[in-house]
Image (spheres, coloured by chain):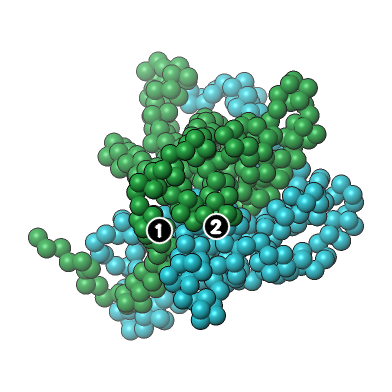
Amino acid sequence: MSDIAPIRFRSATEETPLARWALIGIAFAGLAVLVFAPLIAVFAEALVQGAWAAVKSLGNRDALSAIKLTLIITAIAVPLNAAFGIAAAWFITKFDFRGKAFLITLIDLPFSVSPVVAGLCIVLMFGSNSLLGGWLVAQGYHIVFALPGIVLATMFVTFPFVARELIPVMIEQGRAEEEAALTLGASGWRTFWTVTIPNIRWALLYGVLLCNARAMGEFGAVAVVSGKIRGQTATMPITIEMLYNEYLSVAAFSMAAVLALLALVTLLLKTLLEIRHADQLSAQRRH
Amino acid sequence: MGRPLIHRSPMPGLGLSMGVTLTMLSLVVLLPIGALLWKGASFGLCNIWDTVNRERVWAALFLSFRLSFFAALFNLVFGVMLAWVLVRYRFPGRRILDAAVDLPFALPTAVAGIALTALYAPNGVFGSLAKELGWKIAYSQWGIFIALVFVGLPFVTRTVQPVIEEIEREVEEASATLGATRLYTLRRVILPMLAPAAMTGFALSLARAVGEYGSVIFIAGNIPLVTEIAPLLIVIQLEEFNYDAAASIGIAMLLISFALLLVINLIQVWSRRRIGYV
C-alpha cells in the first residue's frame, strides 16, 4: 500500500483510531494470556532441564509404545471417518429424501455429547458385562480396554469432522458437473474420481486435518475405554496424564510438546489451505 | 400429496452411499448411545432419579453448568470483539492472531490442561502473581473457569466472522448519514445483525464446556462438592465398576446436551426466519 496523501479523513463506517487500537490491543492481550501463554508454557516446562532430558524422556519403551499406539489409532480411525464423510456427503448432497435435516443432526450429534459420555456409551455397549460385549469376550474378542474400543471412541468423537466440511462445499457446487459426466457416458466411479474428488479435495484435506488433530489428542473418551494399561492401551494423551500424576513433569511436558508441535503444524496447514484454496472450502472457512 | 421417501435420481451410488452412511452412523454413534439409554431403561427411571438426586451429583452438575455458562458468556463478549477486529482491521500479525484462535481446537485437551495448571498453579507464572493478591486460581473454581474459557474460545469468533464479512457497508453508511454516532450504529445496527450467529456460538461454546473433561481435571483440584465436575463423576463411578450410577449421570448429561442442541437449532430456525441467514 503506497499511501501518499498526508491527510486522511476517517470514513463514517470506521471507528476512531483510538478505539481501533484499543480493540486490537485487547485482542492481542487476550489471546496472549489465553492461547500463547499455555503454548509457551508447554515448551518451557519440557525444556526446563534442557533439551537432552526432554528428548531422553521420549526415548523409553512406554513413551515409544504410546506414540506408536496413537499413530495406529489415527491410521485406522481417520481413513474410516474420511470414507464415512465422503459417503455421507454424497448421499446428502446428491439425492433428495425425507428426513435429511434429521440425518445431518444425527451426524453432528457427537459434537454435543461429552467425550466422557461417549466413552461410557462404548463401555456399556461392548464391556464384558453387557450382552454383546460378554458374547464377544467369550469368542475371544476384547473391545473395551483394548485397541478396538479406543478406535471406536476416537471415531465417535471425530465422526462429524469430514462430513461437515464436505456437505456445504458439495451443496454449493451442485450436481451439474457430475450430471454432465454421466450424460457423456462416464461410469459412476469414473465420475466420482475424475469430477467429484478434484472438486472436493481441498475441503476433504481440511476435514481430514481437523479430524486427525482431534483423533491424536482425544483424551476424555479414550480415558474411559482404554483401561490405561502402560505399554499397551496408553495413548499419548493418556501417558501425559499418567506421567503428570506421577510428578514426572519433564516427561509429561515433553510428550505434550510433541502433541503441541503437531497442533501447530495442523494450524499452519489449515491457514495455508484457507489462503490458497479458499474458493474450494466451505464459505465459513474463507477469511 | 405423498412425497416419496427418496426422489428418483440419475445419480449413481445411492445404495452404496446410503448403506455406508447409515451403517457407520449406527455402529459408531447410534448403537452406543442406544446402549446407554438401554442401560438406563433397565435400571429404571426411579433408580436413575435416586442416583442423580444426591448432593454430590447435583453439586457437580450445577458446577459444570454454572461455570460453563460464565465461560461461554466471557467468550461471547470477547469472541464478538475478536471477530470484529479480525475482519475489519488490518494490522501486522492479523494472520497469526486469526490462526491462534483455532489453537484450542487443535491442541489436545490434556496438553491444555497441564499447561494451564503450570501457569496458574501457586508456583506458576500467573499463579504466583495472583497469589500475591491473595487470589487462588488453580485448584479452585477460577481454574475451571479459565480452562472452560480456553476450550470454548473459538466458537463465537468462528460463527460470527462470516456474518461480519457479509455485512453491507451501505447499511452503516445509511445509519451514519441519518446522524447516528458510530457507537449508536454499532449498537443498533451491527449488533442485532450479529446476534443470531453470536447466540449460536454461545450455545456451542456452552455445550462444549459442559462436557469438557481433559483440560479441566488437572487444574480443578477435584474436591467433591467444590471443584468436582460432572464428567469426572462418571469416570469415578466407572473406576468403581458402578455402571448403573455412571449410566444415570451419563443420561442426565445427555439430556442437558440434547436440550442445548435443541436450543441451537431453534436459534437457527428463528434467525433464518428473521433475517434469512445464520
Q: Label 2 belongs to which residue?
A: B241
How many labels sit on residues? Answer: 2
Q: Compare residues A32 and A277 and report the one nearer the observer.
A: A32
Residue B198 shown left or right of residue A61 in the figure: left
- Residue drawn at x 32%, y 77% as measured from the top left: B15
- Residue drawn at x 43%, y 22% as measured from the top left: B187
The numbered mark 2 sits on a residue in which chain? B
Q: Label 1 belongs to which residue?
A: B39
Packing grade of label 2 (10 A; few <14, some 14-19, many >=20) is few
Quarter of the figure with residue A109: bottom left
Q: What residue type is labelled 1?
A: Lys
Q: How far apart are marks 2 and 1 (CA)?
A: 14 Å
Name the front one of labels 2 and 1: 2
Q: Which chain is depicted green?
A: B
Q: What residue type is labelled 2?
A: Phe
Marked residue nearer the N-terminal end (2 or 1): 1
- Residue drawn at x 61%, y 57% as measured from the top left: A223
Residues at discs 2 and 1 both on one chain: yes
Residue A155 shown left or right of residue B188 in the figure: right
Q: Compare residues B93 and B178 and report the one nearer the observer.
A: B93
Does residue A30 show up? no
Residue A45 locus on image (x, y percent): 81, 46
